[in-house]
Image (spheres, grey):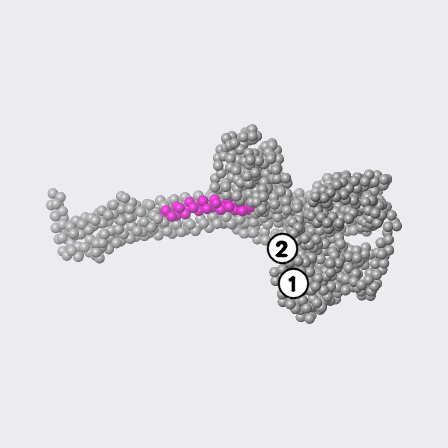
Amino acid sequence: MESLTLNMISRLGRQLLPQSLRAQFTVAFLTLALLILAGGATAVYALRTSNNATRQLTDERLVRMQNGQDMVQRTLLIERQTDQFLTTRSPEILRSSHAATVEQLEALDQLVQQLTAANSGVAILDMHQSSQIFRNTANIVAQLRESLLQTEVAFEQALEDITGRLTAAQTPASLERAMLLFDLPQAIDSDAVQRLRVRYEQLSRTAGKSEADAQAPDLFSLRQRIINQNVVIKRFNEELKNEAGTLVALARAQSNAYTQDYRAALEGLVEDSNRSQQWVLIMLGTSLVFAWFVTRVFMGRHVLVRLNQISRQLRQEHTHKTHLMMADHGNDEIGNMARAVNQFLEDRLQLEKRTAQLSIATERLAVQNSRLEREAIIRAGQGHVLELIARSTELTEVLDSLAHLVESQLEGMMVSILVLDEEGKHLLHGAAPSLPKAYCELIDGIEIGPSVGSCGTSAYRREPVVVTDIQQDPLWQDYRSIAAPYGFRACWSTPILSHERKVLGTFALYANTVRSPSPAETQLIELATPLAGIAIVHQLTEKRIRFMGDHDALTGLPNRTLLEDRLKQAMLYAQRYNRLVTVVFLDLDKFKLVNDSLGHSAGDELLKTVAQRMVECVRRTDTVVRLGGDEFVIILFDQPSDLDGVTPVLHKIQEAILRPIHLSGHTLHVTCSMGLATYPADGSDTDTLLSNADAAMYRAKELGRNSFQFYTSEMNNKVQGKLAMQDGLRNALINGEFLLLYQPQVDLQSGQIIGVEALIRWQHPELGMVSPIKFIPQAEETGLIVPIGDWVFHAACRQNKAWQDAGLPPITMSVNISARQFIERDLIDRVKHALQETGLEPRYLELELTESLIMQDLQQAISKMKALQSMGTSLSIDDFGTGYSSLAALKSFPIARLKIDQSFVRDLPDNENDKAIATAVISLGHKLNLKVIAEGVETEEQQTFLRENGCDEIQGHVFSKAVSAEEISLLLQIPRLPQSSRMLNPESEEQQHGRKRPGHPMPGR
């Protein structure tokens, strides 16, 4: 029946349609082509629509997410820039920083407008309000900081004016009030200012009113205003940080909202693509059914077979979800159709692949955003910790900041940082912000060992110790009872090591669950532990440099730097309470014999033993100082008016030193000679007391040694010699008996002369060449150093200009400034006059200052140094390491070079202490972007050590002694100085010792 029906329909179709197969194919395929064209158009349209939607979606969402990230970064940048308002002391820098901050705020407002305009999920009003409050708060902080700077300038000017007038009065009462006003800048609260005000008013009533008293209350009010303004600035700065946190949180919420919106849009796009595929498949199926019907009815069995094959392959591809290529059906219409189906299937496969790739990209983008946020937080925290270290912040604050950073990235973990004590046996509390205080007190001071929990064992083994279960691990057997009350179950400890692999402490993480560290936690520990090590090493290095700067490297006693300070304090106390101060100048008898016979090592051991015995003989309030060699000074503090009370102490010191000392298989009995001078009877200043005590000591040696002598006026024979020296100096200045020699300063890398140091000599008509050691101190005392210094300025600048006019390479002329010169009010004008008169450009003049000179009046010194720098001259610190300047003050000096004192170079590279000091000074100078020059370099071993440790420049006999201007002219014509030979014969040993400098600088020495 079915066959009969098909035959009837086929005959009817042949009658209605053209008889030729081509015509039948044409009619059939025209109909079929319409269906295929519709399906293909639908597929192309769906594919293009999907691609356009994907591109538009990606561009729009990525721009929004980037805007969110930019908002976070700009907010954090504005916060850091605003923090700089609190540290700058220059109104110009403040205003320029504020202008930059205003630009960032305007950009931030534009980002806020862009973000809120395209968002409906985050509260727009909150973001606008937070941005406006943040902007207003930043402007307020800048305005308050500028007002504070103006108040501070007014305060400093008023303080300098009032203290200057009080000091000029030269009365005990005015000096005491001036000293009280010096303490006013250190007052940090209202109570301290009020106490100083009350004390000052009491002193004023006692001494009577003066012109300075009329302005003193305004000074205290200015200081009170500064304190109040500081409080307000800090409060607004905290508000700024809170608003910054709010903005960052809103921006991150906005970014998360965009991410969720992006994911939802992609899911919708995938669904639309799937629906388009279904419609395309439906149309293709319809086309295939129609094609089967047409072929069965109109085209015969040979066409239907081919079409059936295509249909079966399509069904198989749809059923098994695998892509199959159609068989080759020739070049006719059926073959073309098969190829079109293949192309369609490939397009659909590409669409599915792109859809899958977009899904994977979305997931990766979300993971990457989370990782980038975490890395940004870690980098910001890492930078903050390094900034605290660079600012020399207290170690506890630095470690607390590091602990907070780690805990913010690890959920449920608590950080503990322990620091190894100086003996290397106990661990001390460093930082543990989240651990209970009682637990921190229990483990503070715990001794390291092979089975001392996690931290003690880690420090002992010098390797990480991971304890996953405290209750089961044998390392915690003796300490489980300590950890159990607080619920600690896991503890992972890592030793903090220096670059020399020495243990500095431990970094530990505590958990309340039994667990092991994850890779992310291990990575964070490896990041945090070196930071803790840097902080600890920085503190130890600063402490060591400060100690070495004012203590003797051999004995550990205070050195000459602290002597004057301690003696002045004792004299002030004695003056206030009507007491006495006794200065004992002590010298070991025949110490040179010990060095010559047993060697310098034995001599050093002898000095350390004697120093320890002297310290044990005096009170804690007394001071034992080593001047150098075998010379010591003892300051006996708060002595009664009866000098007989000093005798038992002296006998005790003599007996202690006389006790047998065993060195190198020898038993020594050492004696000493002592000279005593008492304040105020034997001198009213430190130099006079020391000089008189020295004279008394030499008198004791003249009388047979192993005794002590009190100073008497008969011992003052040297005074006559000083007077003669002073008269000779006046005549020398009038008669032109001074001359300058010049010692080259050489760049260690290029070997070229980059400058010279002007050194003064006195060509005495009777005594011959006089060393500056002998006449510079006298010039300082009489004030002749000022006109002598003016002569040095003019002569040195004139000579440098002459070298330049002769066509020689331009170099820098270094001239020393003495303390007496530096305190002159017209010092700036004197230097300017010398430059103008000689025509030398200021950049070719360098002024060398000493640490002790600068620290006498720090604020005034910095002011003068800045004035000299503004002229164009460069500044350097001479004899660095022998003074007592703090690192905090050093970074404020407008200097270009540090000069390592020759006392630290003389024993290089054999003396370990000198090596440590030299390398520390070089490293410190480079950290402060300063050039470092070493003086007194006399051997190639010293030169090699300094070059290998990064020293920039040197001067000394290894290249040339101090020579005349003509010889410098010859040296400047040499392109590169030899590295391994001396240019000129060195001075004799006696002249070298004569060039050693006293405790104060010598201008053009």
Per the image, is 95 magenta? no
Which residue occupies 85% across, 60% down?
Answer: 727
Mark 2 or 1, nearer chain start: 2
Q: Residues within 10 Å of mark 2 (few under 14, many from 20)?
A: some
* Residue designated by label 2: 945
464 up-or-down from 799: above or below = above
Tag 2 secondary structure: helix
Between 301 and 19, the residue placed more toward the observer is 301
Tag 1 secondary structure: loop
523 up-or-down from 512: above or below = below
Residue furthest front as drawn: 665
Magenta-tinted stretch: 355-382
| Visible residue check, residue 977 | yes
User: Disc 2 vs disc 1: Cβ atoms closer than 8 Å?
Assistant: no
- Type of amino acid under label 1: Ser
Query: In the image, residue 73 lies at what x, y percent?
Result: 53, 48
Which residue occupies 77% across, 64% down?
Answer: 739
Query: In the image, residue 667 lies at what x, y percent?
Result: 73, 43
Q: Is residue 23 left or right of residue 805?
A: left
Which quarter of the image is occupied by the N terminus? top left
Query: In the image, residue 347 lies at what x, y percent?
Result: 31, 51
Between 384 and 144, the residue placed more toward the observer is 384
Measured in 3D between alpha carbons, the distance from the residue under mark 2 to the one under mark 1, in whole angstroms, is: 16 Å
Per the image, is 374 magenta? yes
Rendered image quadrant of residue 493 = top right
* Residue designated by label 1: 981
Q: Residues within 10 Å of mark 1 (few under 14, many from 20)?
A: few
| Visible residue check, residue 824 | no
